[in-house]
Image: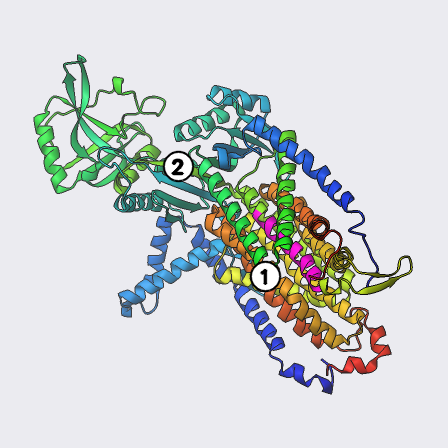
Amino acid sequence: MAKKGSGPLIRDWKPVLVLIALGWSLITLFHVEPQKTVDDWIKLSELPADALRVEVDKRIQALPNFAKMNEYAKEDAQKRLMDEASLANNIQILGHVNGYVIFTNLKLGLDLRGGSQLVLQALPSPPQVPEITPEVMRGVETVINNRINSLGVSETLVQRSGKDRLIVELPGIKDPQQAKDRIGTTALLEFKELDFDPKLGTPYWKSVNLTGADFKHAQASPMVSGGLWRVGFEFKPDGAKKFGELTTRLVGKQIGIFLDGEPTDRGADGRPVPVSEYRGVTVREPILGGTGEITGNFTKEQAVDLSVKLNAGALPVPVKILEERTVGATLGQDSIHKSLVAGGVGIALVMVFMIAIYGVPGLIADTALILYTLATLAIFEAVPVTLTLAGIAGFILSIGMAVDANILIFERTKEELRNGKGLYTAIENGFGRAFTSIFDSNVNSMIACGVMMMFGTSIVKGFAVTLAIGVAVSMFTAITATRALLHLVPRSVNMFGSTLADKKKPVKAKEAV
Amino acid sequence: MSKVGVDLVKYRWLWFGISGVILIPGIVGIIMCLERFHAPLKLGIDFTGGSILQYQFEKKANLEDVRQVLDQSNLAGSQVQQAEVSGQDVVVMRTRALDDEAEKRKLDDNLKAKLGDFKVLSVDKVSATIGPELLQSGLVAMLITFAMMVGYISYRFKFDFAICAIVALVHDVVALCGIFALLGLAIGTEVDSLFISAILTVIGFSVHDTIVVFDRIRENTKHVGSKVKSTEQGEYKKTFGDVANDSVNQTLARSIYTSLTVIITLSALYLLGGTTTRDFVLAMLIGVISGTYSSIFNASCLLVLWRELRVGRKVKPA
């Protein structure tokens, strides 16, 4: 800072603001925790959902003041532990120092972490459901939610979109095909009786108005021998009554069990047997206890899958997977790595370029650029913005655009100096005159970003959000921060090739003070 | 004033010519695409519907074998390509939309039986029903951005300035689409919804570049008619063309530096960044270069031409 002459600058609020912004960014972006704590988070995050719940309960009970805790306190503790477990999915470890871990906590999108995004559409099924109403959608959402929870994946998201669509996000899923099979099927279990059609002269399966919706609970269990599994079920009281009447009426006859119109019996290939070959189950005696079992040559996976679907309930209407975006963890890792390298090289080259062209002011623009990078990332973390590959592209692009403001200002300043203005005036005029252009350019980018956010798919939105935040932050760093920093540079330093002018007109240089 | 770097007005037909060299093949490409793909560009699965599967086989997979499996699995006519992700071979299959999950499972089983185990790198599926919807919302987004930019420019500038800025904007969009049409014909580059974001970003960038130059022209129009002395011509009155020339040269350094910084970051992304966004970055790169060119040369030249035609070479101060 300059000697006695810099009074007005110290009273200036801008350098203070820049320091506050820097401090906030650093605090928000970087976290330090003991190695043990972080390791524990990671351990928690690697547990499947069921095991995690058990572990969390165990820990709450182990708390020293557990006996004194009321329900609210217990809930709070549970929530905190769950949050910590999900935290580990989104931390990027930067380094280890003396038993402490430094990390950032940016939220990465599915294309970087690996996972699946599905867009489901509910299809009307006349005559029962001729139209998708909000009530129907609520039903669909509940069932899909139940089924997803059964997958044991943390941080899943089910979100309604438009009139008849659901967006489902499954981060870090190991077997997307299994998930899709589980989510996409209607899972309508129906009991049917064998009837004779006089017109066709053949028997056919007739609906008896008893479905999986009448179940209270279903559970898969192994059969005594042969390595096959079965699904046991228990009816609700109404269903038990219906089932009792049905089995009383059909003693010695067959009952068929169908899932989404296909027999539950599996053939040798593991697929449902064709309806023409399906013989159903013969009722030996009335079943009045309201329990029963489905045995259909199930493997363990098939039996568990069926029981999960039965417990989650049938979808009120069929759904169709309109869109799927699945990225494996390997590709995600590769993308993260490449983005980091590309971003680092991009920033470094821009910084070198600025110093090469402008010298000391370039260095100051670079300092502002570092502040820009930190502040933008801190905002991403604070909001939080989910970073996708396209989002990172938007961010890196915004770096190029952020220095544009500096270039505009510096070019103006140089011109002012050429016109014989003193350094201080030249800088001030440079900022003043370049402001309209900078503002205009940012309005334009914001318009484009706004439209993308309104109309784009999620991948497009990711790009638009990061670009928009970048543009907004650059207004601060490139204008306010650069200006404050420029004025802090001692007058003796050669800026914009201005020493010559200073020597010729020493008075001019002081006019600012 | 600074030394004149480029004589804008003198070589105007050269500048228009360079644009023509880029635009005309592009437009031909767009027409050829219309004929071959029934769309101005080769549309990707986002807009047409379809599935793209990227699998990494444990053993090196023979593409012929993959093709055979696809034929067996009722997916004849699918495209199979070899790609590379972090130094590993990857098989990319483009099929019609695999809406039936059983069908997808069967394909996976068949592939595993014939070629051994594989790792799923990515699966993208867009069903045929949603594709046109995405295309439509993309086009609506483009039209709205366009309308908003036109509105903004018209508000900021006089009518003739606005028209010239818009022509420069159209120039950039056509150049970008033309080059991608040619790429689509030559190497099968497809456009997806990110391409539309690229266009929107380029529109924003191009308008911004033009505004910087036009702002300067507007600021300098007060010099039109002022007397200047030059060694070659002696004393003469500045025309609008001279002023435009000065203005472009005053902003030239800035235009080029700014574009360079954006080109540097985009190039880093293109060369080192993820493969998924490579075409998207290329689109922005082309758009930014075209945007810089058109705002320096085309937009200002057009403006001069317009003024000259309107007042028959007797330009009054604006």
Give left or right: position of A441 versus A156. right
- Residue sitting at x 56%, y 28%: B37
User: Can residue A31 be seen here?
Assistant: no
- Say which residue label 1 marks: A96
Pointer 1 chain: A
Residue A198, horizontal then vertical, whole percent: 14, 14
Give left or right: position of A248 versus B109. left
Neighbour class for label 1 at 10 Å: few (<14), some, many (≥20)?
some
Looking at this view, name the residue that lies furthest to the right: B231
Give A260 or B108, whichever is nearer the viewer. Answer: A260
Q: Quadrant of the N terminus of chain B?
A: bottom right
Residue A294, horizontal then vertical, whole percent: 23, 31
Q: Is residue A480 magenta?
A: no
Residue B310, horizontal then vertical, whole percent: 69, 51
Q: Label 1 is placed on what type of residue?
A: His
Q: Label 2 is placed on what type of residue?
A: Ile
Neighbour class for label 2 at 10 Å: few (<14), some, many (≥20)?
many
> Which color scheme did the rendering employ for the protein?
rainbow
Magenta segment, principal secondary structure? helix
- Say which residue label 2 marks: A321
Q: Quadrant of the C terminus of chain B?
A: bottom right
Magenta span of residues: B200-219
Q: Are marks 2 and 1 on the same chain?
A: yes
Vertical order, B30 against A346 (above or below):
above
Give A241 or B153, whichever is nearer the viewer. Answer: B153
Q: Secondary structure at mark 2?
A: strand
